[in-house]
Image: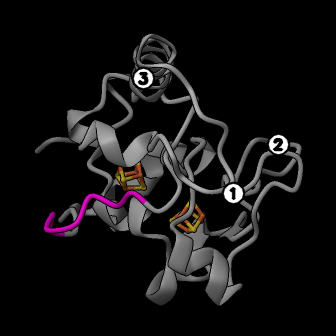
Amino acid sequence: MNNDSIIESGDPGHPDITDEEKEKLLLLVQKMLGMGICAVYGQEDEGLPDACLDCETNLKWCRAICCTFQFALTKEEVQKGHLKYNPSRPFFIARDTDGYCPHLERGTMRCTVWSERPLRCRRYDCTEDAAVPKGRINHE
Ligand code: SF4
Ligand code: SF4
């Protein structure tokens, strides 16, 4: 990611900051990005293909655990308006009180917006994610 695109000095609407302050902010943002508790709105991981997983088979083990994760919607998804976001944490995907995405059909554990699911859902590969406990995914 290009750091200059995260914080641009002289950007109208943003206060001027010193180079030292900019450096500190960049370190903080990068740390938060790494922890998954922040996202840079409008910065998309273009060029990556969709993940190719057998979710259908795995659902009986994983119970769609990935649909409890927090992630930011893209600028285009927010503008399109077909996905629910958390009003107290815009523009992260909404989560119901049970922790699951409101777009998940609880009985079948299927995504009700599959053909228009978020970019981050399309590209998420749980086999590479330590946050998904081993045993929740069948790698056979
Ligand atoms: S945890 Fe993995 S296998 Fe299960 S629904 Fe999510 S991406 Fe698919
Ligand atoms: S949009 Fe669909 S795939 Fe993405 S978290 Fe919600 S239910 Fe899961």
Q: Is residue 29 above or below residue 127?
A: above
| Residue 124 in the figure: left or right of residue 99 | left
For the C terminus, which image quadrant?
top left
Kind of element beneath mark 2: loop
Q: Amino acid at mark 1?
A: Phe
In the image, is residue 46 part of the stretch drawn in magenta?
Answer: yes
Q: In this view of the protein, which residue sits in the foreground, 25 or 82?
A: 25
Instruction: Tell which tag, 2 or 1, sits nearer the viewer.
Output: 1
C-alpha gap between disc 2 and disc 1: 20 Å
Residue toward you, 81 or 117? 81
Q: Which residue is mark 3?
A: 26
Q: Is 125 left, or right, of 8 in this rendering?
A: left
Q: Nearer the viewer, mark 2 or mark 3?
A: 3
The mark found on residue 98 in the picture is: 2
Query: Does the magenta segment cover residue 45?
Result: yes
In the rendering, at what x and y percent does residue 2 appear?
A: 24, 43
Label located before the other in sequence (2 or 3): 3
Mark 3 or 1, nearer chain start: 3
Horizontally, is 125 left or right of 43 in the view? left
- At x 87%, y 56%, the residue is 87
Residue 20: percent from left, percent from top:
44, 10
Element type at mark 1: loop
- Rendered-image quadrant of the N terminus: top left
**Along the line of sight, the residue nearer the viewer: 127 or 11:** 11
Q: Which mark is residue 91?
A: 1
Three-letter code, disc 2:
Asp
Q: Nearer the viewer, residue 134 or 66?
A: 66
How many residues crowd mark 1 within 10 Å: few (<14), some (14–19), many (20+)? some
- The magenta stretch is 43-49
